[in-house]
Image (cartoon, grey):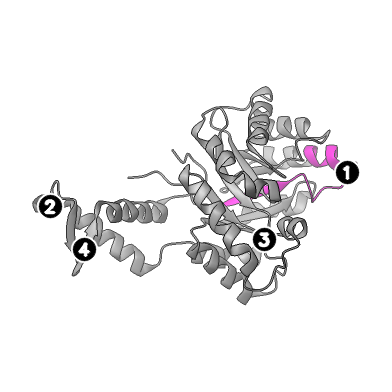
């Protein structure tokens, strides 16, 4: 069975806020992004790192812990990398990635900070250059040294940089979303959708989660605890999907179907590619946060 990591719900928490950081232990997102970038004022960066480290040192988190560091061209990034490693984070999220040179630089920074081999790298896709270099950026996942494991879409920054309007249906962004998904999945990494700013709009959140899942994304980044349950539900296989997946796996496992590339399942043809898809659905249903994608 394929080993999977669930990243259906990815909650942002400010890195300099002890109370929300501690409260996150009681929540059920698959991953938590501890934000040292946008959420922390320039004159509070050092304090934010100390706060993040102190709270994480207490443990008690079930979610995959990711630290969003400051941009690689800032004075704060090296210290952020060290703090993330010392805090035992599962990954660092690098903002404003524009090309493959950025993920290589981030990987070097992690290595210099003493990161263990299991520590992963996530990249924000939020600039026009990143959209033009998606395949080259995603190709970093083929290198053990680069550690690339996920793309997180920065829809707000993309809207500002491209002047595209973030309408309720996000029509202007759909072509970019499709390109991001294709590049990421070509190299076996996850794609996390951008945030919905209006956390009180439950209907819009449901619509964006369904759109993202239909486009092939693996989860959604969130800014409020109330958004966790809808994301977990929508990005999980439905009962019908699970039943179909089990039927396909069971059909291929029958002795009379050994070695066959095509079998009949409930009156429909199923090929090996359908078996691989069914195995992934079942693995996702059984997976938990954290762990390895490979």
Distance of label 2 from label 4 (alpha carbons): 13 Å
Circle on res. 167: none
Where disc 3 sits, the SS reads: loop
**In terms of sequence position, does the residue under pointer 3 or pointer 1 come before the other?**
1
Distance of label 1 from label 2 (alpha carbons): 63 Å
**In terms of sequence position, does the residue under pointer 2 or pointer 4 come before the other?**
2
Q: Position of residue 128 (x, y in %)?
A: 70, 51
Where disc 4 sits, the SS reads: strand
Q: Which residue does the numbered mark 4 point to in the structure image?
A: 269
Q: Nearer the viewer, residue 135 or 151?
A: 135
Asked if the stretch drawn in magenta spans residue 131, the answer is no
* Residue 133 relative to residue 16: left or right: left
Asked if the stretch drawn in magenta spans residue 32, the answer is yes
Q: Which-is-in-front pick, marks 1 and 2? A: 2
Segment colored magenta: 29-50
Distance of label 3 from label 4 (alpha carbons): 39 Å
Q: Which residue does the numbered mark 3 point to in the structure image?
A: 195
Q: Position of residue 149 (x, y in %)?
A: 54, 41
* Residue 269 relative to residue 105: left or right: left
Rendered-image quadrant of the C terminus: top left
Q: Residues within 10 Å of mark 4 (few under 14, many from 20)?
A: few
Circle on res. 42: 1
Q: Residue at x 52, y 57 (%)?
A: 217
Rendered-image quadrant of the N terminus: top left
| Image height of 25 relative to 137, above or below | below
């Amino acid at each position: 069975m394929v080993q999977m990591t669930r990243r259906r719900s990815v909650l942002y928490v400010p890195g300099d806020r002890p109370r929300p950081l501690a409260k996150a232990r009681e929540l059920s997102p698959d991953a938590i992004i501890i934000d040292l970038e946008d959420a922390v004022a320039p004159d509070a960066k050092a304090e934010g790192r100390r706060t993040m480290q102190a709270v994480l040192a207490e443990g008690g988190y079930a979610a995959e812990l990711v630290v969003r560091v400051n941009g690689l061209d800032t004075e704060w990034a090296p210290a952020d990398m060290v703090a993330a490693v010392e805090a035992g984070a599962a990954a660092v999220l690098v903002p404003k990635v524009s090309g493959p040179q950025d993920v290589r630089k981030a990987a070097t920074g992690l290595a210099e900070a003493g990161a263990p081999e299991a520590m992963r790298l996530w990249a924000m896709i939020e600039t026009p250059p990143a959209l033009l270099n998606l395949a080259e950026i995603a190709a970093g996942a083929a290198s053990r040294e680069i550690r690339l494991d996920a793309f997180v879409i920065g829809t707000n920054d993309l809207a500002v940089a491209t002047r595209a309007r973030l309408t309720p249906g996000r029509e202007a962004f759909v072509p970019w979303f499709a390109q991001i998904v294709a590049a990421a999945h070509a190299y076996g990494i996850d794609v996390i959708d951008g945030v919905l700013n209006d956390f009180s709009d439950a209907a819009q959140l449901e619509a964006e989660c369904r759109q993202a899942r239909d486009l092939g994304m693996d989860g959604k980044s969130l800014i409020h605890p109330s958004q966790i349950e809808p994301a977990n539900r929508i990005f999980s296989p439905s009962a019908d999907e699970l039943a179909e997946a089990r039927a396909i796996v069971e059909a291929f496992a029958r002795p009379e179907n050994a070695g066959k590339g095509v079998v009949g399942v409930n009156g429909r043809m199923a090929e090996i590619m359908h078996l691989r898809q069914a195995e992934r659905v079942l693995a996702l249903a059984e997976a938990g946060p954290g762990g390895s994608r490979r």
